[in-house]
Amino acid sequence: MTISLRTKELKGGKESLYLDYYLPNAKQKRKKESLKLYLFQKPKNSIEKDHNKKTRLLAESIRSKKMLEMQHDSAGFGHLIKKRNEYNFLDYFSDMAEEKNSSKGNYSVWISTLGQLKIYCDPELKLHEIDADWLNSFKDFLKDKARTKSNKGLAQNTLHTYFNKVKACINEAFRTKKIENNPVQYVQGFKQGEAERQYLTLEELKKVAKTDCEIPILKTAFIFGCLTGLRWSDINKLTWKEIQHSESSGWIIRFTQQKTKELETLPISDQARDYLGEPEEGEERVFKGLRYSAWNNLKLQQWVMQAGISKTITFHCARHTYATLQLSLGTDIYTVSKLLGHKDLKTTEVYVKIIDQKKKDAANIIPTLL
């Protein structure tokens, strides 16, 4: 009893891979099974060579799995493999999504991805049935057919995020030995798009500071974010004891960053501290009554519009405003990266592109002379 991996020459310079079964005790001693995998017969570049290498590895992995199943069946242990492979994919993905329930943003993305999977998937699909072909087909579905609630196609970053959740699920199933092969390594994901970052210029920030907001605590928190670069999550939980002062360092905030769980020391300006007013007890939240909701987001946008600014502004734009102001006023990118708490300088480099575009726009602002 053997299973051999063989190739068949095709037109167009390609070869197909198939399994050749030799079953000496069966009525049909020889059997062929196409793997629907293809090789470049004479690879011309590194991409084609890499494709051949990964495809051969995948084919060999499938051959080994088939051989193992046949050996277990002949020894009377086939039921053990079948039991391990009976995991329902949608149920498994749903369970993983529920594990993310402690993180509101991440959880909602997992649930949204699950919604798309329920549209695309056979409800009886098993984890072990997912292969490279299935993943590529799901990619095509996301790109060409998936729709938002407003019946629009998915944005590039949404494609990137949704498919990454599926990949994470399969990786975890492989890590915990719920599946024997990991098809993720043979499939490329979507490239991440460059998200547009809205921000306020210094002139616009001055305008909103002079404009009344229906929710005063929201205005105070937003402008404090523009002056410090703190995220919503860190502003919302900020306590008075975390705002400290020394003769040598001036005003600082010592806090545990909600996103990274790391202790940070952030210098802030006298202006930012003065904007908060009189301190209260150390354990008290600085921004008592501040809430994140669709209503508050609406009031934030209305406040900005009343200041004569037509941009779509969310609370996170305060952080973008801080970064672009620092860079445009001459602070070097390394320092700005540290002030924002970025682990990777590449994350901060996005703001440099914004500044470069502003310079380009300024260079072209002078009207034609002739």
Image: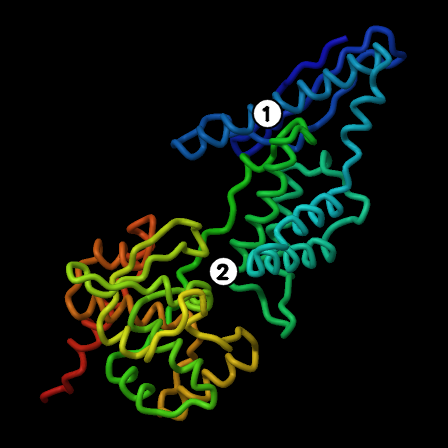
x 40%, y 64%: residue: 231
Question: Split into 4 quadrants, where in the image is the N terminus?
Answer: top right
- Left or right for 217, reference 163: left
Picture coordinates of residue 252 (x, y %)? 27, 62
Question: Quick check: 176 above or below 99?
Answer: above
Count of marks overlaid on the render: 2
Residue that sits furthest to the left in the current view: 369
Reading the image, the residue beneath label 2 is: 156
Q: Nearer the viewer, residue 140 or 252?
A: 252
Question: Quick check: 94 above or below 186?
Answer: below
x 32%, y 80%: residue: 277
Kindly indicate the quadrant of the structure image that contains residue 205: bottom left
The amino acid sitting under disc 2 is Gln
Q: Mark 1: few, some, or many residues within 10 Å (few <14, many ≥20)?
A: some
Mark whose residue sits in front, 2 or 1: 2
**Is tag 2's residue or tag 1's residue first in the polypeptide sequence?**
1
| Secondary structure type for disc 2 | helix
Reading the image, the residue beneath label 1 is: 9
- Left or right for 325, reference 314: left
Picture coordinates of residue 235 (x, y %)? 41, 67
x 40%, y 82%: residue: 219
Q: Nearer the viewer, residue 119 or 271?
A: 271
- Left or right for 136, reference 289: right
